[in-house]
Every structure is written in structure tokens, then in C-alpha cells.
Image (cartoon, rainbow, N blue to C red):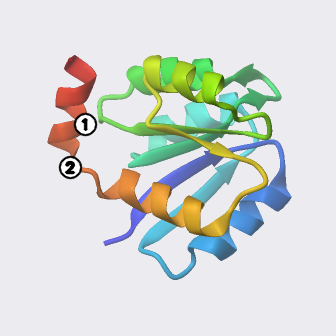
Amino acid sequence: MRSRILFISGRQEDARHLSRMLHTLPLELEHVSSLQQARTRLHQQAYELILTEAALPDGKWLDVLHLVRECPRETEVIVTDPQADAHFWAEALNLGAYDLLAQPFYEPEVRRILFNACSRPRSQAQVMTAV
């Protein structure tokens, strides 16, 4: 069974690049270009993971975390940003993100982190969120 990933990014080229990276894994990447489109899609479909750019055309990564908390299903969030540093990584994890990915994307890291996030048992994710 393929895990569904929603990628929120204003850059179509990044979505094509990620799809090529992930094509051999049991991961299915869907792309939307805005927070509003993500909100609509999340009401229609469940996802194991949301990968979002830190800065979106109509919001930011914190808005995505709030949106995911409204969903009935536990969904991990990974933030991506060209300025990913240790401070931003710590902030993202402390506020509830699963991880932070630096841009430009490094394929082995992307494949490992996305696959692991989608493979994580949901019961463990719910326990970690409650702590």
C-alpha cells in the first residue's frame, strides 16, 4: 500500500523534482500550491504526511500545523526551507513538526526522512503528541 504525501509549495518544479526522487518508494506525492488548496484537499482525502514549505503564498508552516490539528487523523508535518538551520529545526520540532528538510533537496535524506515518517506507527505518533 502506498502512503500519501501532500506537498504544499508555490513551486511546481520542486514537486516534479520530489516526485522523481520518490518514484521507487511506496509513497504517492500530491502537490498543491497554497494553504487554502491544502485545506480543501485535507477535507477530501487523508494523508500520512504533509511536506510544506516554511513560507507559503497565503500563510506559513505554523498555519499548516494548526490545520493538521483540526484533522481527525494523525498526520505528520515536515517543514522545508532554504534557510534550515539548527535554531529553526529546534523550533519546528518543539512546536510539533516531525522534522525539517533543507533546500535544495538532498535525495538520500529526503527519501529516508519521508519514508520513515510515513512508516511510523500511528499509535506511537499519537502517544508522542500527547506527551
- Specify the quadrant that holds the C terminus: top left
* Residue at image coords 46%, 35%: 43
x and y percentages locating residue 73 in the rendered image: 30, 35
x and y percentages locating residue 39 in the rendered image: 57, 30
Q: Is residue 39 left or right of residue 26?
A: right
Between the residue at mark 1 and the residue at mark 2, the CA separation in whole angstroms equals: 7 Å
- Specify the quadrant that holds the N terminus: bottom left
SS for callout 2 = loop
**Type of amino acid at the residue the image marks with label 2:** Pro
13 to 24, vertically: above or below: above
Q: Quadrant of residue 51?
A: top right
Q: Quadrant of residue 106?
A: bottom right
4 to 6, vertically: above or below: below
* Residue at image coords 20%, 49%: 121
Mark 2: few/some/many CA within 10 Å (<14, 14-19, 20+)? few
Circle 1 residue: 125
x and y percentages locating residue 99 in the rendered image: 50, 39
The image's mark for residue 121 is 2
Q: Are marks 1 and 2 in contact (CB under 8 Å)?
A: yes
Farthest front residue in view: 86
* Residue at image coords 58%, 60%: 110
x and y percentages locating residue 87 in the rendered image: 63, 22
**Type of amino acid at the residue the image marks with label 1:** Ala
Query: In terms of depth relative to the viewer, which is nearer, 88 or 68?
Result: 88
* Residue at image coords 39%, 51%: 117
